[in-house]
Image: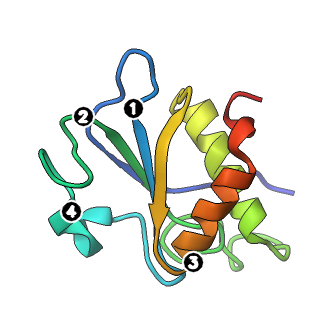
């Protein structure tokens, strides 16, 4: 099986300790372009404060916005658990994140946020 790809966008700067991370999870039909759907909350001094935090928003596995999806390979059934697991690997392996301050999301993003809590110890595993 091919390696799955996960597309994401980041905002702000990762600090030296690599622990100023906010993860924003989108709804089922959304995408990683946080600035296009919660843009009023993004920026210095706002809820997603780019002067303090490194904000990461990724497409979900199976989306049509650049991540691995059903037409890109022999695509298996996936779960919310799978979606968060691949996001945690991306955060750890590609971005070098050591810990996450907060995870937020609405709709399917909310389900992902709950799953992040369930997998909380895996960022360093």
Which residue is labeled 2 in the image?
52
Cβ atoms at labels 1 and 3 below 8 Å apart:
no
Which residue is labeled 1 in the image?
20
Helix, strand, or loop for circle 2? loop
Report whether 123 appears left or right of 56: right
Q: Which mark is residue 108?
A: 3
Task: Please state which of residues 68 and 11 is positioned toward the viewer in this rendering.
Answer: 11
Tell me if I can see residue 4 in this picture. Answer: no
Cβ atoms at labels 1 and 4 below 8 Å apart:
no
Q: Quadrant of the C terminus?
A: top right
Decide which of tag 3 and tag 4 comes sooner along the chain: 4
Cβ atoms at labels 1 and 2 below 8 Å apart:
yes
Count residues near mark 4 (Cα–Cα under 10 Å), then give few for <14, some for 14-19, many for 20+: some
Where residue 119 appears, as percent x and y from the top left, is 74, 48
> Which colour style is shown?
rainbow
* Alpha carbon separation for disc pair 1 and 4: 17 Å
Decide which of tag 1 and tag 2 comes sooner along the chain: 1
Helix, strand, or loop for circle 1? loop
């Amino acid at each position: 099986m091919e390696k799955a790809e996960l597309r994401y966008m980041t905002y702000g700067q990762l600090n030296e300790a690599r622990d100023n991370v906010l993860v924003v999870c989108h709804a089922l039909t959304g995408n990683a372009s946080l600035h296009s759907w919660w843009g009023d909350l993004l920026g210095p001094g706002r809820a997603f404060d780019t002067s303090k935090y490194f904000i990461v928003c990724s497409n979900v596995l199976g989306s049509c916005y650049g991540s691995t999806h059903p037409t890109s390979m022999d695509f298996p059934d996936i779960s919310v658990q799978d979606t968060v697991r691949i996001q945690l690997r991306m955060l750890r392996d590609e971005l070098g994140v050591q810990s996450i301050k907060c995870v937020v999301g609405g709709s399917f993003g909310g389900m992902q946020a709950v799953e992040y809590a369930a997998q909380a110890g895996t960022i360093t595993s």
